[in-house]
Image (cartoon, rainbow, N blue to C red):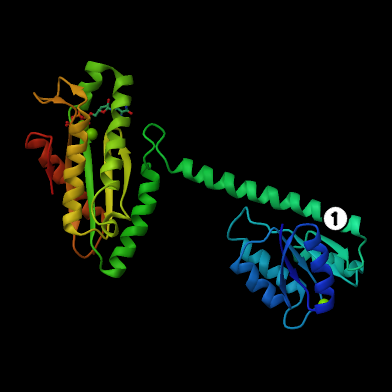
Amino acid sequence: MKILLVEDSRSLAAVIGSRLESFGNEVTLAENGQIGFDKFVQASFDLILMDIEMPVMNGFEATTRIRAHEARQPWAWTPILFLTASDTSDNIVTAIEAGGDDFIAKTVPEPVLQAKMKAMARIATLRRRLAVANARLSEQASRDGLTGLYNRRHMDLRLDAAWEQAVNRGKPFALLILDIDNFKKYNDHYGHQTGDDCLRAVAAAIAKAVAEGNAPEETEHAFAARYGGEEFVVVLPFAAHAAYEAVAVRVLAGIRALAIEHLDNAGIGTVTVSVGGAYQTRAAGRIADLFRCADQRLYRAKGNGRNQAVL
Ligand code: GH3
Ligand code: MG
Ligand code: MG
Ligand code: MG
Ligand code: MG
């Protein structure tokens, strides 16, 4: 385990530290509660051993601050084992009230120390599993189940954040709205199941078109989302105008290159998309206006015969 040992007495810290290291732990020392708190913020530990009486900041206050800091992430809980000479019931109660998990005397016999360390390690393991599960769940919740692209909910959250950044920094911002051409007819002709396969293939082609080419700094913030049934959005925060055009061209070409048969697609014979785009050199105003502009151009692309981008 990675252990943070918060203890002002050098001699005691050396004794306890070497005992802990002797059974395979990695120990970081902090000489008082303030330094302990700072080290806790900078790095991640599996366990904190906390003295009570220390100069500058005592163990109770350091523990209170650590728990307040962890409260930002609901699954975060570094086990804190209090370590002190004075195990009066007052101290035990105060330590646990402050957020401590357990309490040992500095003269604790070796087997008891080891057993308590094992209990603390269990808490640390549980906490790690929760963090992993939480990350996995929030990743899942941001994805569209059919295509694996980001979903509308995630897009809205991320779009607002990116737009605000672009407005504050006076950076460019672009959007592309894509809609599969005559997709209702595709479903009618080939069946809904094949329609789903087509959506997956188109989504993958869009993701590929966004990811490849261009100077990375122009598209590194770009992302694609499934906006609705057979509609997709590509968001291009901070992208140069040339990158915006290039992504639109690559998307159209990438989907044509899939060469998915679609005999009812107005004489073309394969699946195509229409694209409407909007670009601002300096983001200002409301993102909804940019959306409306892209949507109107998509409508024009449809009216002009589909299988094209209006930018
Ligand atoms: P246009 O070229 O004007 O866009 O014509 P369209 O037929 O593509 O447009 P419309 O919006 O009328 O039809 C969209 C179709 O997309 C209707 C719906 O059945 C289909 N669709 C939406 N979501 C799904 C889905 O998840 N799976 C399948 N297979 N089809 C879907
Ligand atoms: Mg002390
Ligand atoms: Mg549509
Ligand atoms: Mg439509
Ligand atoms: Mg359509």
- How far from the left and from the top, in percent, is residue 36? 69, 73
Q: Residue at x 63, y 73 (%)?
A: 38
Q: Residue at x 85, y 62 (%)?
A: 103
State whether label 1 is within 8 Å of ligand 2: no
Q: Quadrant location of residue 161?
A: bottom left
Label 1 element class: helix
Query: Is residue 42 or residue 56 the one in the foreground?
Result: 42
Residue 224, visible in the rendered structure? yes
Relative horizontal placement of residue 164, taking residue 74 as reference (left or right)? left
Residue type for callout 1: Gln
In which quadrant of this rendering is ligand 3 seen? top left
* Disc 1 packing (10 Å; few <14; some 14–19; many ≥20): some
Q: Residue furthest left?
A: 304
Q: Quadrant location of residue 142?
A: top left
Where is mark 1, residue-wise?
A: 114
Relative horizontal placement of residue 155, taking residue 293 as reference (left or right)? right
Q: Residue at x 73, y 79 (%)?
A: 57
Residue 293, visible in the rendered structure? no
Q: Quick check: 34 above or below 46?
A: below
Q: Residue at x 36, y 34 (%)?
A: 147
- How far from the left and from the top, in percent, is residue 149? 36, 40
- How far from the left and from the top, in percent, is residue 157? 39, 52
- How far from the left and from the top, in percent, is residue 91? 86, 69
